[in-house]
Image (cartoon, helix red, strand yellow):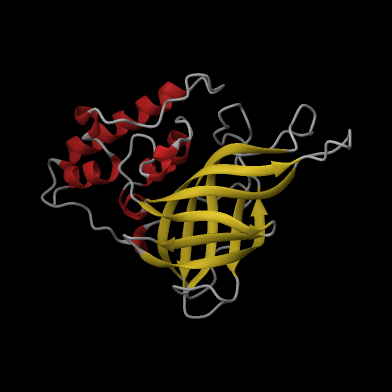
């Protein structure tokens, strides 16, 4: 497989010709750089395809070469002995509630819901494209098509992310294509997203970056999960004008680390 073929299969360059039905671009979003982001993605993809045509073989999908981004105030690194198992782009919503009987109430987070798309080979071979994917994903409205594709890419679904209660994020990475494990998690620590992190469709700030540790009962030797390179998802500062329950769209990278025992 040539490098250009790998890019087509992973990131959808062929769909420019095939004219597929994509999730709808959000023309009403408050992000003035939305079209620029989509243009940047396809320009970057085209450049890499041209370079790939000159390569005798595609780059090896080697997760040992993938490097997580580091926040201005870094999260703790993965525990010693862990190895990177999977990288995914999550696209979905952060979910909040408001106490409408309290005039001074602030939104309370009660969970999140997202589809996870396999970006492992992108992480190991094209880190600049990986960095752009959360911002790209947020330019397209959430529709039923998000259960089959992420924006203009061909990334395959590798799982689902949801909460089993208000304090337990859960990741199901067992699908028809993959059998990577399942994990309920607990937050270990967090750090603010960079000040220049992509905002949401209505200008919402990016949610924090997280380091999670898996709970007892997890499978697939999953031990730690990182949420980084977030885009959007933050709630407004107050509940003024908000309903009792609401969602804020977001996207992020998720890095899954495995090992034989928890630290």
Q: Position of residue 181 (x, y in %)?
A: 44, 68
Residue at figure coordinates x 56%, y 54% from the top left? 162
Residue 75 seen in render: no
Identify which residue, 165 or 2, lies in the foreground.
Answer: 165
Examine the image and state in which quarter residue 137 appears: top left
Q: Position of residue 155 (x, y in %)?
A: 33, 46
Q: How many marks?
A: 0
Left or right of 218? Residue 43 is left
Residue 169 seen in render: yes
Q: Position of residue 85 (x, y in %)?
A: 40, 65
Q: Position of residue 99 (x, y in %)?
A: 82, 40
Left or right of 50? Residue 75 is right
Examine the image and state in which quarter residue 210 appears: bottom right
Q: Quadrant of the C terminus?
A: bottom right
Left or right of 184? Residue 64 is left
Residue at figure coordinates x 55%, y 63% from the top left? 77
Give the vertical position of 38 relative to 119 (above or below).
Answer: above
Residue at figure coordinates x 89%, y 33% from the top left? 103
Residue at figure coordinates x 47%, y 57% from the top left? 255
Identify which residue, 45 or 101, lies in the foreground.
Answer: 101
Give the vertical position of 256 relative to 233 (above or below).
Answer: below
Left or right of 91? Residue 236 is right
């Amino acid at each position: 497989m040539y490098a250009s073929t790998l890019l087509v299969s992973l990131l959808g360059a062929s769909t420019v010709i095939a004219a597929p039905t994509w999730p709808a671009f959000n023309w009403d979003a408050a992000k003035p750089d939305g079209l620029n982001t989509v243009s940047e993605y396809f320009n970057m993809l085209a450049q890499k395809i041209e370079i790939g045509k000159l390569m005798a073989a595609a780059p090896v999908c080697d997760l040992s070469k993938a490097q997580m981004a580091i926040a201005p105030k870094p999260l703790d690194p993965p525990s010693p002995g862990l190895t990177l198992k999977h990288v995914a782009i999550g696209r979905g919503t952060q979910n909040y509630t408001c106490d409408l009987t309290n005039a001074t109430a602030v939104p309370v987070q009660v969970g999140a819901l997202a589809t996870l798309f396999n970006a492992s080979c992108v992480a190991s071979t094209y880190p600049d494209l990986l960095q752009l994917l959360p911002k790209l994903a947020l330019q397209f409205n959430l529709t039923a098509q998000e259960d089959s594709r992420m924006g203009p890419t061909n990334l395959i679904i590798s799982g689902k992310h949801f909460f089993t209660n208000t304090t337990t994020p859960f990741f199901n990475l067992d699908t028809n294509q993959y059998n990577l494990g399942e994990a309920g998690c607990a937050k270990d620590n967090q750090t603010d997203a960079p000040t220049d992190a992509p905002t949401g469709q209505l200008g919402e700030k990016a949610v924090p970056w997280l380091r999670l540790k898996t709970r007892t009962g997890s499978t697939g030797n999953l031990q730690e999960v990182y949420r980084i390179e977030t885009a959007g998802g933050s709630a407004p500062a107050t509940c003024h004008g908000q309903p009792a329950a609401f969602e804020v769209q977001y996207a992020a990278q998720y890095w899954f680390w495995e090992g034989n025992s928890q630290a």
